[in-house]
Structure formats: C-alpha cells, structure tokens
Amino acid sequence: MASLDGEMDGETRENDFKLMQDVGHPNQPNHQNIHIPQPTLRQIDQSNAEKGGYPHSYIESHWDDMYLGGRWSLPINSNPFYLLCGSKTCDAPDSYSNTGSIVSSMLRWGRKVRDYGLEVDGGCMSSFPYMVGGCRVPGVGRDELHMNPNWGHIVVCFNNAFFRIEAACKDTGRVYDGAYFSSKFKEIVERGEGGDEAFMGYGTGLGRDEWALLRGKAEAGDNLSKSSQFSVSVQSRFRTEQKLH
C-alpha cells in the first residue's frame, strides 16, 4: 500500500487499506492464515520449474481456483476486451477502416506469437498466446480456459446476429489486411440483418452458472463462438446511422 502513496487521494487510500485489513482479520468468518515464508515460496516455485508443467508458480493454481471457480452475486467481465469509441465527428467509412486495421493488426500479432516469432519481452510473456484465440468459457461450478489451436475466423456480433469472417487466406495462410475486414464490416452493417433469438447480452449479466447453462444451449449446433479467434461487437450509435465501436 505504501507504494501507492501519491497515486491516489488520502480518502481512497484509507478505505482500501481498511478493506485489506478486514480481509486478513482473524475475526472475519472466512479468515485463513495464508502467511507463507518467502523461502518456502521459492522452494515451491523451484519444484514447479523442475516438473516443467502446471502450475508454473506457487500462486497459479490458487489464482485459477478463484478466477475459474469463483461464484459471486455480481459477475465480473471475465474476458479482456477493447472498447473502441468513435469520435462524434468520425464518419462511418473511417469507423470501418479504423476497426478493420485494428482487427488485422491483432490477428497478425497473434499469428506472430503462435509462430514463436515475437521479439522477447522483458516481462512475463506466458499470457500472450491466450490473447488471440483464448477465452474463459463459463461452466457450471467452474469455468474453463479454452484455447483454440486452429487458425480460422473471427465472429462479428450485430443486431443479435452472429457473422463469420475468415481471418486468413486458406491457400497462403496470410492474414487478411485491414481493407478486407473493413469491407466485411460495412457489408454486415448495411445489410442490417438481425437475430430472432433472445438477446444474448442479457446472459452476461446473470450469475456464472446461469450464464453457463444459457450459453450451452446457444452453442448447440453452432461452432462459431468456440472456434473463433475473437469476436467484434458492432452496435448502432444513432437510430439512423450505424457506426462501429
């Protein structure tokens, strides 16, 4: 907490510090003495490294238990996302072009990671392969981390309908450029088709187990979501004009 001095105001810091103390207080009903000496943690990490498999650190299995198995009254957004907010002065063609460039760049970066061609980073890179093609899939009781090993397509969500866009040329394996994706986004929006099913976004506001059951039904007979590299959601900003976000 001391390292946060200067990064937050005094009242916020006091409140956060109190919460931290409450979590570890012996009088709390869920309190556990989790203090482990540093040398012991190093021994655990060394043992894990010698095994060469999961878990890769002393904290990883505990973190996964919390992250994948945790069930709370209010769900947390479990998969990383980028929210692209277009300028009010940005017209639709620019939105298509910008989003297409970002999608193409993200796919090419993911391909570089998958092919072991990414330059070495000074920090931990173990999470990089999951950023394209990885997804936390809800399950009853415990979620699972799903990784799609095949390089296939992306999914575009628009008007509660789902559209498949190929990510790379089947003949050459080359990821398509931004102009290709831009044209596909424009085609989907101008076509204006919508889905007849119940609004899927509602499910993400439910508890994890409820969402897992609902998602399982939605996936029956449809392999788009599980096999895609990632999804792009397109929403209408104005009633008379469609824009990409």
Image (tube, helix red, strand yellow):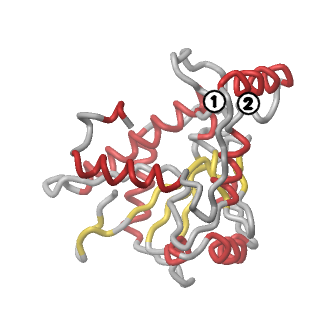
In the rendered image, residue 181, in percent from the top left (x then y), is placed at: 45, 47
Is residue 78 found left or right of 88 in the rendered image?
right
> Is residue 165 in sight in this rendering?
no
Image height check: is 79 above or below 216?
Answer: above
Is residue 230 found left or right of 83 in the rendered image?
right
Q: Amino acid at mark 1?
A: Ser
Q: Which residue is mark 1?
A: 126
Q: Which residue is mark 2?
A: 56
> Is residue 117 in sight in this rendering?
yes
Nearer to us of marks 2 and 1 is: 2
**Farthest-out residue, front:** 27
**Farthest-out residue, left:** 89
Image height check: is 110 above or below 29?
Answer: above
Q: Amino acid at mark 2?
A: His
In percent of the image, x 37 and y 47: which residue is there? Answer: 99
SS at circle 1: loop
In the rendered image, residue 30, in percent from the top left (x then y), is placed at: 63, 61
Judge by depth and name the residue closer to the eye, 187 or 159.
Answer: 159
Number of labels in the image equals 2
- Quarter-wise, where is residue 70 in the image? bottom right
In percent of the image, x 38 and y 48: which residue is there? Answer: 17
Judge by depth and name the residue closer to the eye, 41 or 186.
Answer: 41
- Quarter-wise, where is residue 184 in the image? bottom left
Quadrant in which the N terminus is drawn? top left
SS at circle 2: loop
